Amino acid sequence: MNVKACCETRTLPNNEMIPTTPRQKIFNCYCMEKFRILSLGLSALLVTACSHFQQGTMFGPKKLILGGIEYSETNFGKFTSWRCRSYIQNSSIHVEAGRFSDPDLLSVGFILYDGGNTGVLANYRRHGLNHRWDWGLGDSTASLLNTKFTFMIKPDGTGLYYDFSATPDGESKKADDVYKCSQ
């Protein structure tokens, strides 16, 4: 469906398309265009509204596309996530790290890219007080513990991204990027 169609109509659960109100039309268009808003006052209102939309609090359960497969809070329980921005600049969301609340999926998490709902599944665990996500197998024979990427969130909300793809085994390194994260 194109952006104009999304702005003009909305789809009911039975796939029936109905026209939106002028207020819904504005909201839908801005959400579809990734918050390209000129007015600062309107921007704050719409960014807040769009953030709630993504979290599944205004229009139903949140849906994620992870590795090309859709995961919905309806089927997998509520998602808990941390939205992370550049540590230096107050910028848009770069990374969203999260986990599933389903008791059978406590060690499964996800990483979303660029403030959207698309990303990858990751191994999730608590490492002391820190939250940690590991993903990206080095090769087809690698174990789940031998991953190329790690994202860690410290108790103060500092997010640390590590890319081990070019790091020799057993060698330590500093974080490649640092983020400010909030739940």
Image: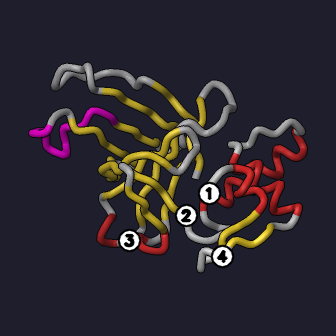
Q: Secondary structure at mark 3?
A: loop
Residue 125 position, x and y percent, is 32, 52
Mark 2 or 3: in front is: 2
Hey, which residue is sitting farthest bottom in the picture?
Answer: 14
Q: CA distance from mark 4 to mark 2?
A: 21 Å
Classified by dominant secondary structure, the portion drawn in magenta counts as: loop
Q: CA distance from mark 4 to mark 1?
A: 22 Å
**Nearer to us: label 4 or label 3:** 4
First in residue order: circle 4 vs circle 2: 4
CA separation, marks 4 and 3?
A: 31 Å
The residue positioned farthest toward the left in the image shown: 141
Q: Residues within 10 Å of mark 1 (few under 14, many from 20)?
A: some
Instruction: Give the residue type at disc 3.
Output: Asp
* Amino acid at the residue labelled 1: Gln
Q: Which residue was labeled with disc 3?
A: 102
Q: Does the residue at mark 2 contact the one at mark 3 (Cβ under 8 Å)?
A: no
Q: Which residue is mark 1?
A: 54
Q: Inspect this view and state whether residue 181 appears.
A: no
The disc at residue 62 is 2
Residues in magenta, as a range: 140-149
Looking at the image, residue 141 sits to the left or right of residue 68; the answer is left
Nearer-the-camera pick, 69 or 155: 69
Which of the pair 16/103 is nearer the observer? 16
Q: Residues within 10 Å of mark 4 (few under 14, many from 20)?
A: few
- Does the residue at mark 2 contact the one at mark 1 (Cβ under 8 Å)? yes
